[in-house]
Image (cartoon, rainbow, N blue to C red):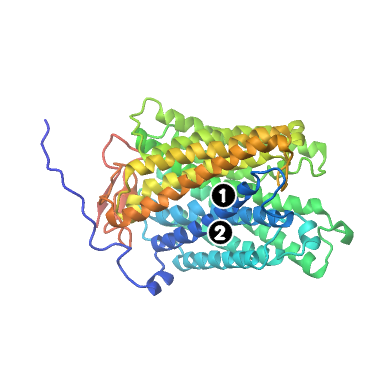
Amino acid sequence: MSTATAIVKPVMPERHFLNDNYGIRSWLLTKDHKRIAILYLFSITFFFLIGGVFASLIRLHLLTPNGELFEADTYNKLFTMHGVNMVFFFLIPSVPAVLGNFLVPIMVGTKDLAFPKINLLSWYLYMAGGTFSMAAMVSGGVDSGWTFYAPLSSGYLKTHVIMLAVGVIIAGFSSIFTGLNFIVTVHRMRAPGMTWGRLPLFVWSNYAASLIMILGTPVIAITLILLALERGFHIGIFDPKLGGDPVLFQHMFWFYSHPAVYIMILPGMGVISEIVPCFSRKRVFGYSFVAFSSVAIAVFGFVVWAHHMFVAGISVYSALVFSLLSYAVAIPSAVKVFNWTATMYKGSIEMSTPMLYAMAFIGLFTIGGLTGLFLAALGLDIHIHDTYFVIAHFHYVMVGGMVTAYLGGLHFWWPKITGRMYPEAPAKLAALITFIGFNLTFFPQFILGYMGMPRRYWAYPPEFQVLNVLSSAGASVLAVGFLLPLLYFAWSLKYGEVAGNNPWQATGLEWETSSPPPTHNFHEIPIVTKDPYAYGEDAEVTVVH
């Protein structure tokens, strides 16, 4: 027996976190995790655009073999500042600082993060680190590469290495504070009934990434401090002329910087774990395996750093061990891919914009992961280690993976953040353009790398020009795909349809509150009574006063 019901048009809530207090002061001194997430959104978008400009200049320069656009020193500064901006000021903080900050407290059913003032401080530290980075750029730049390899950076370069290193160290403390906040919130502030087995997979992923943040980030801070001491006071740490060991720098740098890859990708995997079941209308296949694979990735991430150093002079025996461990870390990543695929199997798939980004993520991340196995093979790595094959592999994981997941997450939760829907047609077009442009940009670089084109060089033999032109043309297409969301997201703030509380008919506590949420997230106390992703079943939560 069915009863006809009138369709009620959703309306914006009268009071929500965006209009609770007006004025710049209320934003700059806010302790509301949602407003801090918005501050991060604007800041991170700025650094992404700066890094994108550097990338565009690099691809323009590489249109011709002889490097006619920039001198060699300028080219070195371009790829250094591109890498620093993208890695330390976009890729690492983007999903945790924006989506994680906004969603983790709501997803676990609490009013804010455990330490609201520290959360605000983390944004100010991020901005302070970014200021040092920009100051180094406008003062003449840095040409060490984003890896700061010593002894080149500790004694032989005349550029502003220390200023940039200080910016990275300060931004690192921002990550530590964010990770600490997430861990304490998940442990101590979950809603009644929100057991570990009912945590959303997005929370599991951010929790695992937070473990890496607080355990690994101090190592890169110590490393860069030692670098500054050697550069400033000629203390022999990394420079062989002073009695130091340059391989020690690589061990310390990669002990953090390889786990940092998982700081970048784990939260993105959490985004995909939310999108896939929603638009497949199915419970996640193997929830426990997907959840614990996040923790496994975090643990394995700390024991594979030396696969970056197979050609750096480490012993063959240790290289063999790190090669085997590098293959092992692929297992929990593969678990996620197989389980996402199994979730979609026989599902009622709706090809909305977030799902397009999720499917793009699965395909591109799989290519990035499989090509990582090539680099874990000792003999093959000798041939392709310092070539464009590594550039392509890294970007398939980071841009094809993390950036795609970030865009998918923004599209999925944009109605919750703003209370407005974006236009679906241009959003789908942007997803398609991004997918095509990305593959046109980076797939030719696999071929270039296998043919032997070295990375970081400002000029190349003429036989590599056709593939470089194709890569640069793809970068232009990719830029259009990245810029389109800026336009229709801005348009939607005024003209977009009112979203309602749950436009996707998704499960999860964040969809139980209004869009945009109130300042304290919930008008009533949420009590979780069912497992997550209960699609096709009764409501996931009940609420009581």
Q: Which residue is mark 1?
A: 263
**Where is the N terminus found, in terms of image quarters?**
top left
- Tell me what residue is drawn at x 54 percent, y 54 percent: 90
Give the mark nearest the N terminus, 1 or 2. Answer: 2
| Displayed quadrant of residue 313 | top right
Q: Of all residues shown, which one is farthest toward the top?
A: 346
Question: Badge 2: how crowded within 10 Å, few (<14), some, or many (20+)?
Answer: many
Q: Which residue is mark 2?
A: 175
Q: Where residue 331 appears, x then y in whole percent? A: 59, 33
Residue 269 visible to an observer of this rendering: yes
**Residues under labels 1 and 2: Cα distance?**
10 Å
- Tell me what residue is drawn at x 64 percent, y 35 percent: 466
Q: Where residue 108 appears, x then y in whole percent? A: 39, 52
- Tell me what residue is drawn at x 47 percent, y 48 percent: 482
Kind of residue at badge 1: Ile
**Label pair 1/2, CB-CB below 8 angstroms:** yes
Element type at marker 1?
A: helix
